[in-house]
Image (cartoon, grey):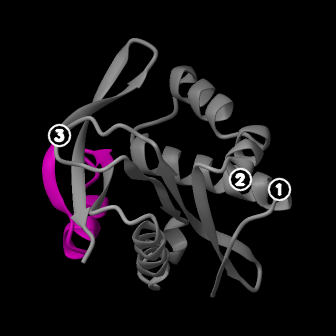
Amino acid sequence: MTLRAPTNSDASSIAAISIEVWIGTYLKRGVSAFFADYALEEFTRLKTERLISDPNEFMLVSDNEDGIDGFVRVSSGREAPVDGCSNVEISTLYVQPRHHGKGIGKRLLLAAFDHCRTLAVPSVWLTTNAQNDPAIAFYRAQGFEHVGETHFRIEDEGYLNNVYRYRLP
């Protein structure tokens, strides 16, 4: 497993992992057109290329001998939905489900913390779906504290998300 910065040639792989993880995590009972349209419009090669080249976005991918199996994205200049958080968000941490338990997520997260330290912020925050028990357990085990709630929105629909903060030592 190697961690590295992505290039534009990685954009389609990152978009595919995003679709895989997002649908597998949040659509437990089937895929409606509403959610399929969202995923296919949100997780595209072109949008991912824009993120890779955005100076306010920091990304790392985890590479194995066959390709990318996970990635992390840290976004600067993001207003937190609750008070007491910095303006730096871990906006995405996705690892393919078949690679869970191998330490990939933890290595990506530790690298994200290192990046946040270079920004000299006191903390970093993230949100996760309030029903995503495996992610919540993972973040709590890494030292994140629950600091509030917000809603993830798709069109007029809102989905409860927990807000977590990690204080950087």
What residue sits 59% from the left and 52% below the top? 57
The answer to whether residue 130 is visible is: no
Quarter in which the C terminus is drawn: bottom left
What residue sits 32% from the left and 22% below the top? 158
**Residue identified by numbered label 1:** 8
Asked whether 56 or 40 is in front, the reply is: 56
Q: Which type of secondary structure does the marked residue at label 3 adopt?
A: loop
What residue sits 30% from the left and 50% below the top? 86
State which mark lies toward you, 3 or 2: 3
The magenta stretch spans which residues? 127-148
Distance between the Cα atoms at labels 1 and 2?
A: 7 Å
Quarter in which the N terminus is drawn: bottom right
State which mark lies toward you, 3 or 1: 3
What residue sits 34% from the left and 61% below the top? 121
Q: Residues within 10 Å of mark 2 (few under 14, many from 20)?
A: many
**Residue identified by numbered label 3:** 83
Q: Residues within 10 Å of mark 3 (few under 14, many from 20)?
A: few
Mark sitting earlier along the chain (3/2)? 2
**Residue identified by numbered label 2:** 52
Asked whether 107 or 115 is in front, the reply is: 115
* Image quadrant assignment for residue 82: top left
Q: Is residue 163 left or right of residue 33?
A: left
Reply yes or no: does residue 130 show up in magenta.
Answer: yes
Q: Evaluate if marks 1 and 2 touch, with contact meaning CB atoms under 8 Å apart.
A: yes
Residue 120 sits above or below residue 16 on the image:
below
Residue 66 sits above or below residue 18 on the image:
below
Q: Could you tell me the amino acid type at mark 3?
A: Asp
Q: Could you tell me the amino acid type at mark 1?
A: Asn
In percent of width and height, residue 124 lies at: 32, 58
Q: Which type of secondary structure does the marked residue at label 1 adopt?
A: helix
